[in-house]
Amino acid sequence: GGLYIFQGHTVLNGGEISFNTALNDGGGMEIGDPKGRFTQTGGEIFSNSANNMGGGIYIAQGILTISGGTIHTNDGVLGGGGIATGLSSNSTIANSAILSNTTAVSATGGGIKNEGTLTLTNVTLSGNSASIGAGLANSGTADLTNVTVSENGATNNGGGLNSSSGTLTIGNSIIFGNTAPSGSDCSGVITSAGNNVADATQCNGEIEFNPLLQPLALNGGDTLNYALAAG
């Protein structure tokens, strides 16, 4: 792909990683060692592709920290169109948007495929597509706080979120308006930390109503997100 990190630390403060292709994992970039680190504070990772996993980013192990920016329109054929994480990885993503990433029709995790430890805070997952878990497919440990998951689409189940194993905990989040033949918003076991606008049966949500999300816009910030309509 575009960048391979072994034991170093690379920082993306702006600019882009784009239009790269990997025969295996990590179309845009890959972290391949426990001592490897990648930090993104802004900019874009987009239009990258991988024949295996992690169209935008693949972190086999090591540390991924994203505190701003957008991961969009990447493709990971075997999963993790935007981001794919391995068992020994630790990923922290905040104040960012993961949009319109794709996988093959039989793969999981259009936006994110997580097998490691993942924390999302103030993140928008939208427009991603996969067979299962279009927004996020989890088999590791994932904690979501103040996250909006909407307008993702799965061809099988888990249009928004899927947790096939491990633990997936959501709090103060909106999971609404995703599509799938089964479990349109969520599938698998979801643990609630409270105050979620999400379906009670599918997502273990507490507040079941239409949040009247407005179209994606900057809304005074640096990345696209959903505002709520008055009413």
Image (cartoon, helix red, strand yellow):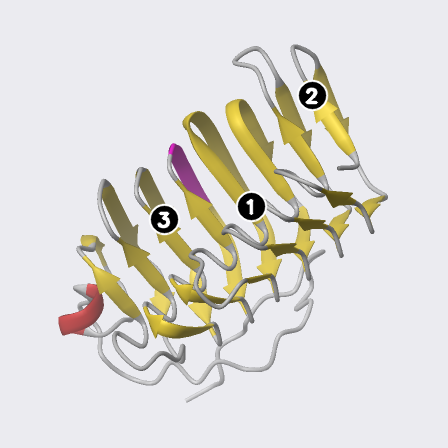
Q: Which residues are magenta?
A: 116-120
Q: Main secondary structure of the magenta part?
A: strand
- The label nearer to you, 3 versus 1, is 1
**Distance between the alpha carbons at the discs numbered 1 and 2:** 15 Å
Give the residue at x 15% y 72%.
Answer: 200
Residue 150: quarter of image: bottom left
Q: Can the viewer see residue 147 in this picture?
A: no
Q: Are marks 3 and 1 in contact (CB under 8 Å)?
A: no
Q: Is residue 208 above or below residue 187?
A: below
In the rendered image, which residue does mark 1 sit on?
83
Q: Is 47 on the left or on the right of 87, as rendered?
A: right
Give the residue at x 41% y 67%.
Answer: 131
Q: Tell me the element at label 3.
A: strand
In the rendered image, the quadrant that contains the C terminus is bottom left
Q: Are marks 3 and 2 in contact (CB under 8 Å)?
A: no
Task: Specify which label sits upstream in the sequence, 3 or 1.
Answer: 1
| Amino acid at pointer 2 | Ile
**Distance between the alpha carbons at the discs numbered 3 and 1:** 16 Å
Task: Specify which label sits upstream in the sequence, 1 or 2.
Answer: 2
Q: Position of residue 121 (x, y in %)?
A: 45, 46
Q: Is residue 72 above or below residue 20?
A: below
In the rendered image, which residue does mark 2 sit on?
5
Give the residue at x 56% y 71%.
Answer: 127
- The label nearer to you, 3 versus 2, is 2
In the rendered image, which residue does mark 3 sit on?
144
Residue 58: quarter of image: top right
Q: Position of residue 122 (x, y in %)?
A: 49, 52
Q: Can the viewer see residue 185 in this picture?
A: yes
Q: Position of residue 168 (x, y in %)?
A: 26, 47
Mark 2 is surrounded, within 10 Å at the Cα level, by few (under 14), some (14 to 19) or many (20 or more) other residues, namely some
Give the residue at x 59% y 21%.
Answer: 32
Q: How many marks?
A: 3
